Image (tube, helix red, strand yellow):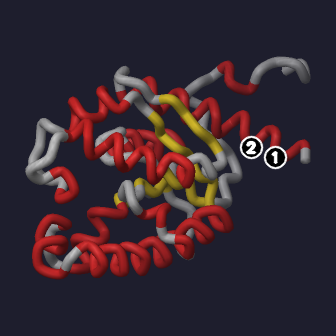
């Protein structure tokens, strides 16, 4: 292959020699879990949904943790789970929306993974999250208002991610393709440094 040929010519080819976790960050409802599962398949890596791992460790749902123990206890448990997952072998990790707000977790994400901020229009996300009543931060509130408040607080932190990928309102497969392309570009550039 000529040196100027694009290694992206085969969008389904796996990234080779991935020695770090791929950590997906972003607001609730942006598609981290669904896209992460598909991205893991494409990359040949295991997948972990941080929220599901927290639920398994606690023996209760996130809503139940919030209701019985409060958000502070949930965040402490989340930090412990993130540490365990980030210190393990490479995986594709879908984080909860607030995981990166913890400075220790954020440091581990930076040190031990390639982080990808999945970003989408707030109206698209609001439409998605109002379909299910499983998100404690949204209970009894307007989803767009809550998401706007969260975006104001979290976007500057999410902006520290290694990559930002606009995932929009399209199909999850398109998001996987976009993230895969950006990962390939990022790793090519990293090799040149």
Q: Secondary structure at mark 1?
A: helix
93 is higher (above) or lower (below) than 87:
above
124 is higher (above) or lower (below) than 140:
above
Q: Residue at x 63, y 52 (%)?
A: 160
Label 1 crowd (10 A; few <14 / some 14-19 / many >=20): few
- Please state the horizontal and vertical placement of residue 16, each as a whole percent of the image: 68, 46
Q: Residue at x 30, y 63 (%)?
A: 51
Which of the numbered marks, if any, corresponds to residue 65?
none
Circles 2 and 1: CB atoms closer than 8 Å: yes
- Please state the horizontal and vertical placement of residue 134, each as a whole percent of the image: 13, 53
> Which residue bears the numbered disc 1?
190
Asked which quadrant contains residue 59, the reply is: bottom left
Q: Secondary structure at mark 2?
A: helix
Asked which quadrant contains residue 65, the reply is: bottom left
Q: Residue at x 51, y 59 (%)?
A: 91
> Which residue bears the numbered disc 2?
187
Whole-number angstrom distance, CA of label 2 to CA of label 1: 5 Å
74 is higher (above) or lower (below) than 193:
below
Label 2 crowd (10 A; few <14 / some 14-19 / many >=20): some
- Please state the horizontal and vertical placement of residue 41, each as a whole percent of the image: 44, 44
- Please state the horizontal and vertical placement of residue 20, each as a whole percent of the image: 63, 60
Please name whichever residue, 11 or 115, is drawn nearer the observer in this view of the structure. 115
Asked which quadrant contains residue 38, the reply is: top left
């Amino acid at each position: 292959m000529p040196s100027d040929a694009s290694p992206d010519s085969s969008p389904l080819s796996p990234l080779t020699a991935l020695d770090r976790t791929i950590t997906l960050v972003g607001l609730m409802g942006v598609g981290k879990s669904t896209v992460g599962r598909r991205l893991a398949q494409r990359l040949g890596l295991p997948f972990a949904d941080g929220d599901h791992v927290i639920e398994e460790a606690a023996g209760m749902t996130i809503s139940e943790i919030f209701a019985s123990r409060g958000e502070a206890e949930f965040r402490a448990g989340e930090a412990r789970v993130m540490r365990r997952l980030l210190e393990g072998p490479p995986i594709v990790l879908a984080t909860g929306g607030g995981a990166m707000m913890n400075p220790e977790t954020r440091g581990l994400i930076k040190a031990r993974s390639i982080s990808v901020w999945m970003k989408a229009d707030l109206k698209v996300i609001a439409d998605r999250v109002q379909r299910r009543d499983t998100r404690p931060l949204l209970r009894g509130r307007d989803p767009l208002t809550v998401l706007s408040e969260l975006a104001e607080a979290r976007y500057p932190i999410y902006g520290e991610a290694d990559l930002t990928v606009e995932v929009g309102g399209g199909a999850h497969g398109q998001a996987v393709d976009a993230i895969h392309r950006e990962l390939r570009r990022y790793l090519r550039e990293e090799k040149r440094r």
